[in-house]
Image (cartoon, rainbow, N blue to C red):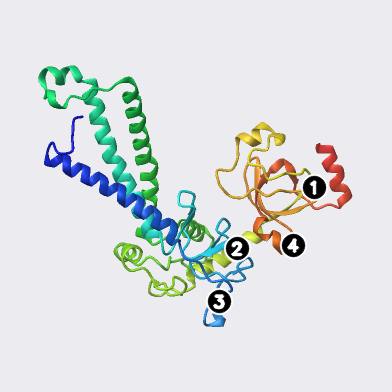
Amino acid sequence: MWLPFFSSWISVGVYVLFLFLVSSTLYNFFCAMFIGPGYVPHGWQPENVSDCRYLQYCTLCNGYKSPRAHHCRKCKRCVMKMDHHCPWINNCCGHHNHAKFTLFLISAVCGCILSSVLLFIGLYRAFRINWYFLYGDHQYIVYLTVYQLAFTVFSFGLALGVVLAVGGLFYVQMKQIIRNETSIENWIVIKAVSRPRTDDDVFIYPYNLGWWKNIKQVFWEPQGNGLTDWPVVQGCHPYTLTIEQIIQKEDKKARKKQYTIVQSYNGSWFPISKGFRTCLSPPCSDEYRIPLTVGDKVYVTRWRKRWLYGEKCSTNEAEDCDSKGWFPRCCAVEFTTTDGEVTKVSKKLS
C-alpha cells in the first residue's frame, strides 16, 4: 500500500533485492540439501598403510576415518569435514556443502531483515493513519483490517524470529569458518587445550592458516578429495588432530565407569514411568536414547543429574550403531553383579 512496485526507483530496487534474496535462499538451501557433504568411501584407508596407526577405525563403515571426518549416526556414513547434522536440510553440513549452507543462512537472515523493516514501517504507518491522512501523502495510506493486522504482526514476528535464531547460527558458522574449525573440532580443541600436558607439549590447531585463507578454503578454494590433502600449519603433523582424538578417546576409556541396568528402559525421550523430574530435565542434546533391559552392562562416560550417557556392552555387531546414548540414571547402579543379584535389585526398586 505504501510502496507499490512502480511508484519509484527505490520501490523497484527493494522488490528486486527481496526477490534476489528469496531466490538465493532457496537455491543455496536445495544445493546444500542435494549436493551433500561428501562421504568417506566404504573400506577407505590411506595410501601409506603405516599412517593407519594415526587414524580411528569405523566398524560401521568398515574403514578408517580420514582426517576431519566423523561418523554421522543419522546419515549412517563417515562424513568428510563434518560440522553437524542439520534437520533443516535433512543432511550433514560438511566438506562439499559448507559454503552453500552458510550462504543459505546469510540469504535467509538478510531477506528476513528486509522483511522486518518493511513490515514494521507498514505497521507504523497503519497505526499513524490519522496523521498520514491529515499531513501525509493520501495516495499511499496504509489501512489494515483486523485480519490483515493479525497476519502482518504474525509475519513480522516470524521474520524477526528468523533474524535472531538463524542469525545466531550464522554467527557461529562464520566464527568457525574464520578459525577453520567445525563444531566437532571446536570441542576437540577445547579438550586438547585443557588436557594436562608437559611444558614442551603445546597443542597447535593444525588447520588455522589465517582468517583470509580459511575463508577462501571454504568459499573459493575447497580442497580436492577432502580426505588427506588438508594444508596444515608449518610444523604440524598431517595427523596432529587425529592423534589428539585418539589420546582423548583413550583418556575417555580410562575414566569410564561400568553400570548394571536394574530397570528396563524403552528408549523414550520422555519416560513418564521414570518420574516427572527425569522427564523435566532431559539432556539438552538430540543424541540417541538407548533401550535397555535388566542385566545389561553399560560403560558410562558422561553424567547428568538424572541421566547417564554410555555404551552398551554387546557382542552383536548389528547393534553397534544403536549401542551409545542417554538413559535415565534411576535405571542403573554402579557395580557389576551376578544375574541373580541384579534380579533382586530390580524387584526391590520396582
User: Looking at numbered disc 1 in the image, what kind of residue is underneath it?
Assistant: Val
Q: CA–CA distance between discs 3 and 1?
A: 39 Å
- Contact flag, marks 1 and 4 (Cβ < 8 Å): no
* Residue 165 x/y as whole percent: 40, 41
Give the mark nearest the N terminus, 3 or 1: 3
Give the mark nearest the N terminus, 2 or 3: 3
Residue holding disc 2: 249
Q: Where 75 falls versus 235 (above or below)?
A: above
Q: Say which of 330 and 324 sits in front.
A: 324
Q: CA–CA distance between discs 1 and 4?
A: 17 Å
Q: Secondary structure at mark 3?
A: loop
- Contact flag, marks 4 and 2 (Cβ < 8 Å): no
- Contact flag, marks 2 and 1 (Cβ < 8 Å): no
Give the mark nearest the N terminus, 2 or 1: 2
Residue name at image x 56 percent, y 82 percent: 49
Residue name at image x 18 percent, y 35 percent: 4
User: Looking at numbered disc 4 in the image, what kind of residue is underneath it?
Assistant: Asn
Residue holding disc 4: 316
User: Looking at numbered disc 2 in the image, what kind of residue is underneath it?
Assistant: Lys
How many other residues sit within 10 Å of disc 2, few (<14), some (14-19) or many (≥20)? few
Give the mark nearest the N terminus, 3 or 4: 3
Pick the quarter of the image with the C terminus. Answer: top right
Q: Secondary structure at mark 2?
A: helix
* Residue 36 x/y as whole percent: 45, 61
User: Looking at numbered disc 3 in the image, what kind of residue is underneath it?
Assistant: Gln
* Residue 296 x/y as whole percent: 77, 52
Q: Where 7 falls versus 172 (above or below)?
A: above
Q: Of the residues tagged 2 and 1, which is closer to the observer?
A: 1
The image quarter containing residue 122 is top left
Residue holding disc 3: 45
